[in-house]
Image (tube, grey):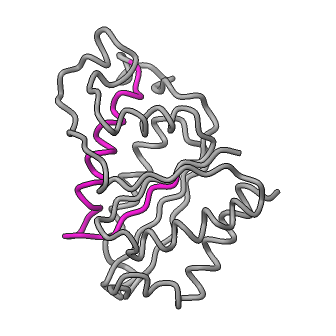
Amino acid sequence: MKIVSVLGSPREKGNSATIAKHFCDAALRFGAEVQTYALNKLEYRGCQGCMACKTGLDRCVLEDDLTEVLEAVRETDVLVVASPVYFWDISGQLKTFIDRTFSYLVPDFITNPNKSRLAPGKKLVCILAQNNRDRSSFPDIFRKIDYFFNAYGFVDRQLIRAFGVNEPGEVAAHDDVMMLAEKAAEKLCGG
């Protein structure tokens, strides 16, 4: 089982990264192979809207640090995307990554029932950490991510959320969230 973890936080030991690490550590115990990419350490540009991935190439035309990440996602079984909630949404780093995944769609994705260039059956774990304690806040964030990755053919898309966390790594003391991460790893990798 291959796992690619894409960290969208600018804080290396932020709460979303802490949850993702806990998930990945549990997956390693179940024999998974894990690659982690901290987007804030990479040099990359956003989607240029050039449509080269729809008119002549089957991948993004840009050559930068995100090229390796996009290729790793093509080869993975499980994708973990982790982000803090900044200004009512995912971080800019993760948004830019998701924009670049546009290259995964076939040229006629609007009318084609098979929209994705990716192998079917991939799984997604979305991790969100927010300072706001209100559990009903920002429900649209995962709905948008779920919509895109459903179009890419991901068959199992799940959300792990942490509420009321702000200081880096503070979420490690939230046993309920850490247990959710472990259970998700077990479900996807252990049985």
Q: Looking at the rendering, which quadrant does residue 67 occupy?
A: top left
Q: Is residue 54 above or below residue 145?
A: above
Judged from this view, the residue extending furthest toward the right is: 191
Q: Residue at x 28, y 21 (%)?
A: 61
Residue 117 rendering spot, x and y as whole percentages = 49, 23
Whether 154 is among the magenta residues is no
Q: Is residue 174 above or below residue 63?
A: below
Q: Looking at the rendering, which quadrant does residue 170 occupy?
A: bottom left
Whether 102 is among the magenta residues is yes
Judged from this view, the residue extending furthest toward the top is: 56
Nearest the camera: 23 or 89?
A: 23
Q: Is 10 situated left or right of 169 in this image?
A: left
Q: Residue at x 53, y 91 (%)?
A: 173
- The quadrant of the picture occupied by the N terminus is top right
Q: Looking at the rendering, which quadrant does residue 125 occupy?
A: bottom right
Q: Is 41 situated left or right of 34 in this image?
A: left
Q: Is 31 situated left or right of 62 in this image?
A: right
Residue 35 rendering spot, x and y as whole percentages = 55, 49
Residue 119 rendering spot, x and y as whole percentages = 59, 28
Q: Residue at x 49, y 42 (%)?
A: 150
Q: Is residue 70 above or below residue 168?
A: above
Q: Which residues are magenta?
A: 80-106
Q: Is 60 situated left or right of 7 in this image?
A: left
Nearest the camera: 131 or 20?
A: 20
Q: How many marks?
A: 0
Q: Residue at x 75, y 63 (%)?
A: 29
